[in-house]
Image (cartoon, rainbow, N blue to C red):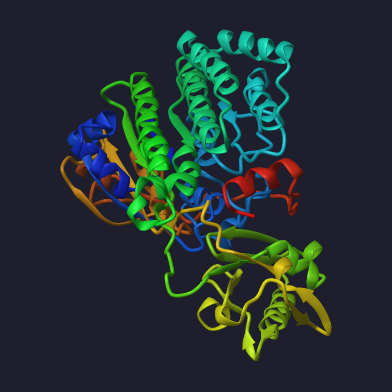
Amino acid sequence: MRVLVYGMDGATWRVIRPMMEKGKMRNLRSLMERGSYGVLHSLEPMISPMLWTTISSGKVPEKHGVKDFVIPSDAVKTRRIWDILEKYGKTVGIFGHMVTWPPRPIRHFMIPDVFARGPETYPPEYQFIREMAVAEAAGARSLAKYLGYVWQGVRHGFRLSSLWAAARYMAEEKLRHYGYLDTYYRKRLLKLRFQADLFVHLVRRFQPDYLFFYSNVTDACAHLYWKFHEPERFPEVTEEEVRKYGGVLEEVYEASDRALGRILKTLGPEDQVLVISDHGFQPVPQMEDTKTYVVRSEALLKALGVADRVRYVVISDRTYIRSLGNDTAFEDQLMERIRRIQIHGVPLFVTKRDKVGYVLVTVNNREASPHIDLSESVEIEGKPVPLGKLLSESDTRISGEHHPEGIIVVAGPGFKKGVEIEGASVLDITPTVLALFGIPIGRDMDGKPLTQVLADSVAEAISYVDTHDEDYTYSSEEGEYTDELKEHLRGLGYL
């Protein structure tokens, strides 16, 4: 028996169900017909590396310690599912999971995620796939380099159809003078093709017991193209834009479904499958009565003189800030300093603690917006700072944002058929996978096995241990935001 977890970052029933009514998403529909499905509830803040680490550990962020995009793999404070499985003699194959850089030697493979700070993979001969992504992001399109990547790719599973699709795209890009919206999703669809090719090759070569495949194309494109998917919610969208980009989001979901179908062909009838997302998606709310503004987070932190003491991430109009070293006294002072910034006697920002402990900052749009003129200045601790440096009008380019209801679909002999899964959380995936393997669940995990959908024979055999973290050590390194990573995150709306 093997277990596959297929991660579709940000996938939502809001897109999938209408597509299925049109006869699309056939591979996912097939799994649903022979298995069970429902909503997988997320956690706040909905920051992907935090959520995927929660998924792979069964523990809340306070326990696993991952709260942003730059935590290295050896700084995770708890064992994750692949670490536990290896302790019990199982083999694993991990492709694209967040917070897996640098990769450690593992049985059998570990290919880090798109936010990795280096190209390293395990085994090392697959490093070319990360080098290829870095070269593309940097615009380093030398013919010699590409031919080298192509040769390595062909040796390790790249299909001729994928290479032909890449060649066709490169020709069209030059001939048609593609703009940003034309290239953004096309590049990511090509990347998904190559990733699926390589993953299928790796699975066939190593035959691991536990398989994990992750793609963020559904998340990345939902941020950018949602307004064309539901143009009635965005008055600024033109008919020409709808004609060109209105089908992009469905095309992305269909490509993800095709990749799933290819991977499913490597499995047998005795194998188990879980398709999950870390959160769902929704359109960014539009406020018609007044202009809305978002904070230029880095500029605000620099104006307060704390930019080198904190990490931050932006999700829609919300900025989540945490101090290096988790200095809560410093964070409390920072919140108070931000609260004191006023315009015409009205607080410019709203600050509070979220459930994980981040300092959450938003612009006080309801009360302050009528007083905001970006050509004027505001006083910050005795110094005038132009509002145009601190704020910008809400960026309509990012039109989709995270929603707490993701998806879960399960199928295989270890699961019941036809159950509507209710109350499932991202915390429950690792306990459920351990139950499928007959491995004890840690009592220190915050999730629970999904007994409502597990076959009776699996549910009856569930056992527990106090912890899987005995003798586990981890690093205290925080990690750094590289220029490449910052640019990547800005493109997704996270900075």
Give x and y (percent) for residue 286. 43, 64
Depth check: give the residue in front, 362 or 8: 362
* Image quadrant containing the C terminus: bottom right
- Quick check: 99 left or right of 23? right
Residue sitting at x 69%, y 79%: 338
Given the current orientation, which residue lies at the most extreme left position? 418
Depth check: give the residue in front, 279 or 287: 287
Depth check: give the residue in front, 433 or 425: 425
Residue 182 versus residue 131 in the image, above or below? below
Q: From where the camera sits, is residue 486 visible?
A: yes
Given the current orientation, which residue lies at the most extreme bottom position? 345
* Quarter of the image where one finds residue 416: top left
Depth check: give the residue in front, 427 or 402: 402
Give x and y (percent) for residue 476. 74, 54
Residue 300 versus residue 20 in the image, above or below? below
- Quick check: 155 left or right of 454? right
Residue 138 versus residue 465 in the image, above or below? above
Give x and y (percent) for residue 489. 63, 47
Residue sitting at x 36%, y 25%: 258
Q: From where the camera sits, is residue 473 visible?
A: no
- Number of labels in the image equals 0
Give x and y (percent) for residue 10. 43, 47
Residue 343 versus residue 245 in the image, above or below? below
* Quarter of the image where one finds residue 1: top left
Residue sitting at x 54%, y 76%: 365
